[in-house]
Image (spheres, rainbow, N blue to C red):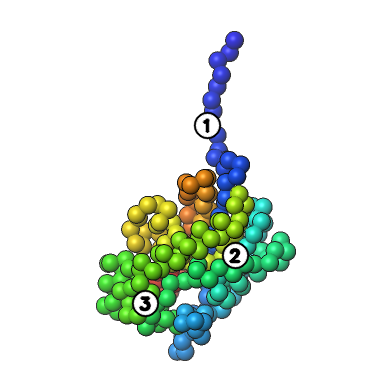
Amino acid sequence: MAEPKYPQRRFVAPPGSTNVFLVRHGASMPYGDEPFPLLDGTGDPPLAPEGVEQAERAALRLVEEDIEAIYVTTLQRTHQTAAPLVARLGLDPIVEPDLREVNLGEWEGGAMRRHVAEGHPLAIRLFAEERWDVIPGAEPQEIFATRVRRGLDRIVAESPGRRIAVFTHGGVIGEVVRQLAEGGRGFAFATADNGSITHLVQIGDRWLIRRFNDTSHHPGGLDRPDPADDGWIPAP
């Protein structure tokens, strides 16, 4: 009798597991002379034209994932990024306030982009210490971490065993993955691109990180630097 063979197989999430697709919103409007409008103290810019295109491409990718629920935050860029998928699936998005972006205190409204581009001393310290609360008045790191985990736990509790798309922010995605990686550096995962997809699977009380910053649905994978860029701009 032939001996049984055991080939390598692709991962398949077991029945009852919850699949979470974290989608970073599309690129928002550039910061100019005027600050972005604020919503509850947090910058709330709309999507730029390229962000609208990124939203469409993310939707085309996610329609293949049998999504059963869609979550957004309070900020308009997540609603606008989710809109193409909402239209295709006919699902009403659910707002999860705890997954909104980290509040940047005195650097809210787009000022952070300018300070980073100009090499502000606090921006240099921010990257060295990998804590958002280096910025004056910014949300304390521990409070940010706690509310992000609270938001993640709540949406999973609401949709156990389902496949859900969560349209959120770069800082939030970085914090979620850092926590699930059990103690990664503060900014180790704070590089999610606009329109990227990060795939998480919850199996019982365990989490698996299946994909981080998947940009295969965008031209060039969003991994080619723009010659106009003069430095790394962190997630927010």
First in sequence, mark 3 or 1: give its number: 1
Instruction: Give the residue drawn at x 62%, y 67%.
Output: 94
Q: Kindly state the secondary structure of the residue where label 1 is placed.
A: loop
**Amino acid type at mark 3:** Ala
Q: Position of residue 33 (x, y in %)?
A: 45, 89
The part of the image, by quadrant, that contains residue 165 is bottom right
Instruction: Give the residue drawn at x 65%, y 55%.
Output: 67
In the rendered structure, find residue 146 and report the number of the disc placed on it: none
How far apart are the two marked residues, 2 and 1, measured between alpha carbons?
35 Å
How far apart are the two marked residues, 3 and 1, measured between alpha carbons?
48 Å
68 lies above or below 146? above
Residue pointed to by mark 1: 8
The part of the image, by quadrant, that contains residue 134 is bottom left
Q: Callout 3 environment at 10 Å: few (<14), some (14 to 19), or many (20+)?
A: some
In the rendered structure, find residue 138 and report the number of the disc placed on it: 3
Q: Callout 2 environment at 10 Å: few (<14), some (14 to 19), or many (20+)?
A: many
First in sequence, mark 2 or 1: give its number: 1
Residue pointed to by mark 2: 71
Q: Position of residue 152 (x, y in %)?
A: 50, 60
- Which quadrant: the N terminus? top right
- Which quadrant: the C terminus? bottom left
